[in-house]
Each structure stands twice: as C-alpha cells, then as structure tokens.
Image (cartoon, helix red, strand yellow):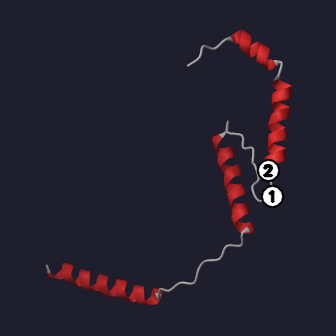
Amino acid sequence: MFPFDHETLNQERKFWPQYMEAYEDVLAKTSTQDSPWFVIPSNNKWFRNLAIAQIITKTMDDMNLQLPPTHVDLRDIERHYHAAKQKADAGEKDT
C-alpha cells in the first residue's frame, strides 16, 4: 500500500475538471444502444438496487422474451403427485 500524502491530493484536485471531462468523454464515446453504460450511484444500497432492477427489467421487457413451449404434462405430474401422497399417507396410517 502506498502512503497517503495530503499534498499530492491537493495538487491532484486542480485536475478534477479534466478528470470529469475525460470520464464523461469515455462514457459518451463508448456507450452504444446495444451496449449502454449506466452510471449507478452506490452510496445508497436501496437506490442502487432499485436502479439496477429497473434497468434489467426494462431491458428484458424490450427483448420481448417468450417462454419456450413445455413438453411436460402438468396434469399428469399432478396426478402422480397426489397418488404418491395418498399412498404415503395410507402407509403412515398402517404403522
């Protein structure tokens, strides 16, 4: 770990506007419609989580995702489940 020097920090603060300009420039030039950047503040967890959840929800809605067709007969599974449960319940009564 390098030593923290307040004088260096004070000198670097002079460059803050240039740092912010470079930061904004990078985001503007690399964010695209297909691969956008999102700047999420992280100093408040609930807000960070809400912002991320909203971005993911909107992105997935925009994708218009559809469930694949099922190859399972849910009624058949339900019948098997109830039959097995009845058998198990009857076994408990016998003992």
Q: Local crowd at mark 2 within 10 Å, few (<14), some, or many (≥20)?
A: few
Q: Residue at x 80, y 36 (%)?
A: 23
Tell me the element at label 1. Answer: loop
Q: Which mark is residue 31?
A: 2
Q: Local crowd at mark 1 within 10 Å, few (<14), some, or many (≥20)?
A: few
Q: Residue at x 31, y 82 (%)?
A: 85
In this picture, is 8 found above or below 49?
A: above
Classify residue 61 by image quadrant.
bottom right
Q: In front: 72, or 28?
A: 28
Q: In front: 55, or 47?
A: 55
Q: Residue at x 72, y 56 (%)?
A: 55
Classify residue 11 by image quadrant.
top right
Q: Which mark is residue 33?
A: 1
In this picture, is 46 found above or below 79?
A: above
Mark 1 residue type: Gln
In this picture, is 5 found above or below 39?
A: above
Would you say 6 lies left or right of 67 here?
Answer: right
Q: For the residues marked 2 and 1, what is the alpha-carbon distance in whole angstroms? A: 7 Å
In the rendered image, residue 15, in percent from the top left (x then y), is placed at: 83, 22
Q: CB under 8 Å between callouts 2 and 1?
A: no
Mark 2 residue type: Ser
In the rendered image, residue 7, in percent from the top left (x then y), is placed at: 73, 9
